[in-house]
């Protein structure tokens, strides 16, 4: 039996393996999933992605299926429920950020047609294909993540610093950071 090589960070447990093997790095073009990743990546700030993934299903319930139009209307009652919800990261600043970002997300949709069109325009609608051989080569920030972060912040988004944006770029396939030896590297290339 042939052993499959995957990016070493994914070898933590089944949750990470499933995420790596089916979702991470695949070019994304669905606005609701874009909004989901914006909320989740912002929630990750200062924490591990594993922590966020474990809470993802509860986030889906708590944030109305990641519908930005619904989340943008959350008021104090919803905020109180979210702060009390042990199934999510109960940081008030991150919760307020998600609601704020829902409003900004809708503004981008109105201006650009879709959030997808806006974010992919930074890379001329083509993923950045890297050829990393080891995890130590992968940056946490790039000029492109700084550029996107700056644009998002100018549009009023919060919890979208360059590191968070780079993680977002990796998760959503704007950049292919699978190691070249990983079986998903070439599979993701075929998704472009």
Image (cartoon, rainbow, N blue to C red):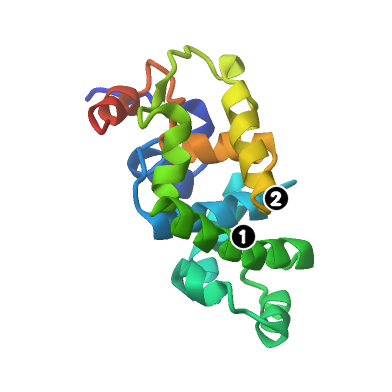
**Residue 61 appearing in the image:** no
Q: Are marks 2 and 1 in contact (CB under 8 Å)?
A: yes
- Crowd class of label 2 (few under 14; some 14 to 19; many from 20; radius 10 Å): many
Q: Is residue 180 above or below residue 70?
A: above
Tell whether 170 sits left or right of 154: left
Q: Quarter holding the C terminus?
A: top left
Location of mark 2 (residue): 159
Location of mark 1 (residue): 101
* Depth order, front residue of 84/111: 111
All told, the count of numbered labels is: 2
Tell whether 102 sits left or right of 191: right
Q: Residue furthest front?
A: 111
Please tell me which residue is depicted at 69% across the width and 61% down the height of the picture. 97
| Image position, residue 182 (x, y; %) | 37, 22
Please tell me which residue is depicted at 53% across the width and 60% down the height of the picture. 107
Q: Which mark is residue 6?
A: none
């Amino acid at each position: 039996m042939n052993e499959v090589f995957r990016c070493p960070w994914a070898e933590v447990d089944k949750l990470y393996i499933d995420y790596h093997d089916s979702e991470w790095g695949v070019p994304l073009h669905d606005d609701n999933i874009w909004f989901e990743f914006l909320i989740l990546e912002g929630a990750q700030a200062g924490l591990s992605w594993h922590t966020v993934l474990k809470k993802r299903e509860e986030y889906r319930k708590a944030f109305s299926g990641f519908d930005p139009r619904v989340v943008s209307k959350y008021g104090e009652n919803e905020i109180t429920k979210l702060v009390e919800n042990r199934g999510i990261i109960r940081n008030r600043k991150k919760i307020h950020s998600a609601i704020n970002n829902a409003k900004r997300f809708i503004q981008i949709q109105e201006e650009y047609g879709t959030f997808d069109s806006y974010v992919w325009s930074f890379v001329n609608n083509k993923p950045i294909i890297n050829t990393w051989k080891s995890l130590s080569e992968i940056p946490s920030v790039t000029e492109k993540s700084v550029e996107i972060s700056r644009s998002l912040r100018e549009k009023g988004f919060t919890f979208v610093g360059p590191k968070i944006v780079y993680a977002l770029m990796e998760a959503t396939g704007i950049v292919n950071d699978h190691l070249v030896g990983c079986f998903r590297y070439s599979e993701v290339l075929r998704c472009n």
